[in-house]
Image (cartoon, coloured by chain):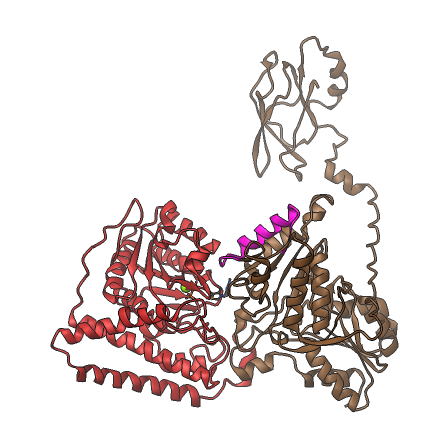
Amino acid sequence: MARKATATQAKTQPNVPQFSEQQDLEAFREMLLIRRFEEKAGQMYGMGLIGGFCHLYIGQEAVVTGITMASEKGKDSQITGYRDHGHMLVMGLDPKGVMAELTGRQGGLSKGKGGSMHMFSNEHRFYGGNGIVGAQASLGTGLAFAAKYSGDGSVAIAYFGDGAANQGQVYESFNMAKLWNLPVVYVIENNKYAMGTSIERAAATTDFSMRGASFNIPGEQVDGMDVRMVYDAAQRAIEHARSGKGPYILEMLTYRYRGHSMSDPAKYRSKDEVTKYRQERDPIEQVRARLLAGGKISEEDLKQIETEIRAIVTEAADFATNDPEPAASELWTDITIEA
Amino acid sequence: MPQILMPALSPTMEEGKLAKWVVKVGDKVKSGDVLAEIETDKATMEVESVDEGTVTEILVAEGTEGVKVNTPIALVLAEGESAGSAAAPVAETAPEPSEAPVVPAEKAAAAAPSAAVPAAPKFEAQSDPDLPEGVEMVEMTVRQALNEAMAEELRRDKDVFIMGEEVAEYQGAYKITQGLLQEFGKDRVIDTPITEHGFAGLAVGAAFAGLKPIVEFMTWNFAMQAIDQIINSAAKQLYMSGGQVTAPMVFRGPNGAAARVGAQHSQDYSAWYSHVPGLTVIAPYSAADAKGLLKAAIRSPNPVVFLENEILYGSTGLVPKVDDFVLPIGKARIARKGSDVTIVSFSMGMRYATQATEKLVAAGVDVELIDLRTLRPLDIDTVIESVKKTGRLVTVEEGWPQGGIGSEISARVMEGAFDHLDAPVMRVTGKDVPMPYAANLEKLALPNVDEVIAAVNAVTYRS
Ligand SMILES: Cc1ncc(C[n+]2csc(CCOP(=O)(O)OP(=O)(O)O)c2C)c(N)n1
Ligand SMILES: [Mg+2]
């Protein structure tokens, strides 16, 4: 439930906003693509096709899906940390390019030179893909600065985690963003843990929507497992930013099902906790149930979508497996631009 | 002080314009009253009276340009003070600036013959302690060695504590702090939020106040958030305080490239920190050195940057089983004696250097292999002694070439053993590029055994 967080709150709506069947179908598709893509990535990591760190977004799909549905694709910019595959898929980046980056191949979005944590697209206005926790808060504020400077009417959306929310530069950014009323929406993806540290063990106050209060930045705590709630709150936040009123904070209460990265045994939380989220709050299952309850969509229809999604993911995996590694000469390219 | 002098607005100001007089002859003034306004091309300033008295004479007219700093511009006499006491000397210089220019303080200092820069004190490295006859050697991983070192020092000194991300409940992101929370409790083994700049600064402050923090950075890449506190606060403190306040502490964690973690997570900071006076920088390779040097670092009265390597954590070595195994900071280790060529390396570079040495020795090249172990202070004497014998030098490191450890050694060897060199020094380094993710490119970016062998072949003119 969205609720008031600071003195100068935007109005929140107590009722669950309704999605049209069309919106539910869109959300279902997007979230399922992320889910299946991430499952495949996990599998390919296990096969040794993906190396290093690989942070999966499974469980958190509703956040980026709802936000992006409320944003203007191709106009609004987005930036996040290393848990970035879902963001790119929803923003419309080619799943083949994303997967091939995970495997470090020449057809990857960064020609194989970036890896799972470092992918970007000027065209889609996606700015990473950042490995340093908290950096995207300032960088996202800079995207908003550029938006205001150029007057292009875009909004910057900066996602960061509950752990990142404790970094100092986040607050330096909040201050500047409000001081200059920059069009930025800070999306704090509170999945309750930063690696093995629960929010209670790392944060003096765990209501992250309040973190902008002393800067007079409105904030809302949102059920990040329900894509309708995310979408609804995002619409408010983006409208607020776009209309010149400055930054807005959305704390998304969400959950990651997998470990922090592939090598995390996740001993710091109980199996029950994970099971409970999966069974009772799963973002995709919520939409599936709604669609079926509506009576117009059948199991068959959803199966059909599943099949289509699987085909996309399989194609991406095949491409990423067979695409060659970058040419050795790429070692020395893209370091600086010859003036 | 009856004379009012033309003030300087900045250390570099030599002259200025007397823009305006706010007082006139006969006015009574007290301290803080504005007397005049002066201007330079950069700024304006008000001249205030510091004493109480009466303006008896104005020596430089309003609007005069080019008034030299320290020229008397007015006389203000306190009650009972006689004009005669000051007027005579002043008259010569007024109203125009004096002919003999008043030299600003800075110029004066520059003109005086400068004191010779005293020679820097020479660092004398100590030798490793002698081990008891027949001492038992225990095989352990670098990880265990580091863990033991911390546990022993935590046991020994209650002012020692460790803080960092995931060091306590999670037992360390790389399990270096395994078991420490259980033995020493949560007051001494402390999980921090992800706030490197903040907790590094906090630890430096705690060290100022007498504690001996060990700060674990999950990796040194994240210490870039905190580098200001390491350098500006910790490293310079002793000097800035004239020897009063220091920061006896250790900053540690894995440095350099791990495997396939890309540009932001694969960087070697050896040269960066070794640049900074006030820091001690240690980068061990073997398990024994990891243990003995980490114990020394924790006991050091100075801030120590302790650079570990993730890939070496699992490698094993023999560590002497003695009660208190502490090694001297600043002493290189001759890993193999030889007479044909010297290879100098440290940390992960030693792995390439060691494997290359094995192959080279098998091929008949008598390699002398030196593990620096400490990068600051640098045991250049050991390197120079070796080069005097071999006449040839190859350095090996994972970091970037420009301004690297190899560059420094090369320069110091030129200074100390130029006449002994039979070939130019060669550096084997990481390539001058951010670390790529793709497996093939990553391999190319890192130094390798073949490159070390090729460099040795080059300096020994073998083909
Ligand atoms: C400056 C910095 N410190 C530490 C790390 C290591 N690290 C990577 S992710 C992470 C946890 C971040 O948690 P959170 O912000 O909650 O995001 P989540 O992983 O839950 O999405 C840490 C400590 C890093 N990448 N950068
Ligand atoms: Mg988190």
Residue occupying the point 37% across, 57% down: A144
Residue toward you, B344 or B325: B325
Q: Position of residue B192 (x, y in %)?
A: 51, 57
Q: Is residue A263 above or below residue B32?
A: below
Residue B26 visible in the snapshot: yes
Residue occupying the point 47% across, 55% down: A169
Asked if residue B199 lies left or right of residue B129, the reply is left
Residue B212 counted in the magenta span: yes
Q: Which chain is red?
A: A
Residue B304 visible in the snapshot: no
Image quadrant where residue B384 sits: bottom right
Q: Is residue A309 above or below residue B8?
A: below
Q: Position of residue B383 (x, y in %)?
A: 81, 71
Instruction: Read off the magenta span.
Output: B191-213
Q: Is residue B454 above or below residue B34?
A: below
> In the picture, which quadrant includes the C terminus of chain B?
bottom right
Image quadrant where residue B68 sits: top right
Q: Position of residue A198 (x, y in %)?
A: 43, 61
Q: Which chain is brown?
A: B
Residue occupying the point 68% across, 84% down: B449
Residue occupying the point 66% across, 47% down: B210
Residue toward you, B109 or B394: B394
